[in-house]
Amino acid sequence: MTDLHTEVSALERKSATAARLFDIRRIIGGLFVLYGVIVTIAGLSPSEADLKKAQGVHINLWTGLAMLALGLFFLIWMKLRPAVAPADVPDPARADVAPAAVPEPADG
C-alpha cells in the first residue's frame, strides 16, 4: 500500500509540474519580454528618417516598453497565481468507483 501511495504522490507532483511548465502565460510573457527588449533596443537610437516617418514619435521605444510591460505582467501573474493540475474526475465507467449520490427532489 505504501508503494502505491508513493507512486501516486510522485505522479501528482509530475502532473502539477507539467501544468506549470506548459502554462500559456509563461509562453506569452516570455515572448513579449523578448520582443520588447529587441524593439526597445531598436528604439533607443532611431534614425532621422524613422522619426520623420513616425512624425517625431519614438514609436519603437514606446512600443518596446509597452511590450516589456505586458510581458512582465504575464510573468508576474503566473508567479502570483500559479497553475494547478486539474483535479481528478472519477470515471463513471470504472466499476471500483461508486457513483455520486444524487439527491432526491423534495415533495412540497
Image: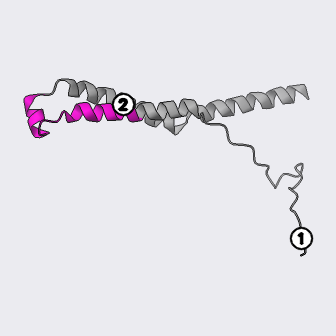
| Residue at 76% over, 48% down | 89
Q: Please tell me which of labels 1 and 2 falls first in the chain.
A: 2
| Residue at 57% over, 31% down | 80
Rate crowding at label 2 as few (under 14), some (14 to 19) or many (20 or more) other CA atoms within 10 Å.
Answer: many
Please state which amino acid type lies under the numbered disc 2: Leu
What is the x, y in percent for residue 8? 79, 32
75 and 92: which one is in front?
75
Can you tell which mark lies on residue 88? Answer: none
Can you tell which mark lies on residue 68? Answer: 2
Q: Which residues are magenta?
A: 47-70
Q: Would residue 96 appear left or right of 67 to someone viewing this image? A: right
For marks 1 and 2, give the one nearer the viewer: 1
Please state which amino acid type lies under the numbered disc 1: Ala
- As helix, strand or loop, the secondary structure at mark 2 comes to helix
| Residue at 55% over, 35% down | 22
| Disc 1: which residue | 106
Q: Would residue 32 appear left or right of 8 to someone viewing this image? A: left
The secondary structure that most of the magenta stretch takes on is helix
Magenta includes 101?
no
Q: Quadrant of the N terminus?
A: top right
What is the x, y in percent for residue 27? 47, 34
Quick one: which residue is furthest to the front in this view?
A: 108
Q: Quadrant of the C terminus?
A: bottom right
Rate crowding at label 1 as few (under 14), some (14 to 19) or many (20 or more) other CA atoms within 10 Å.
Answer: few
1 and 75: which one is in front?
75
| Residue at 54% over, 33% down | 78
Residue 40 figure quarter: top left
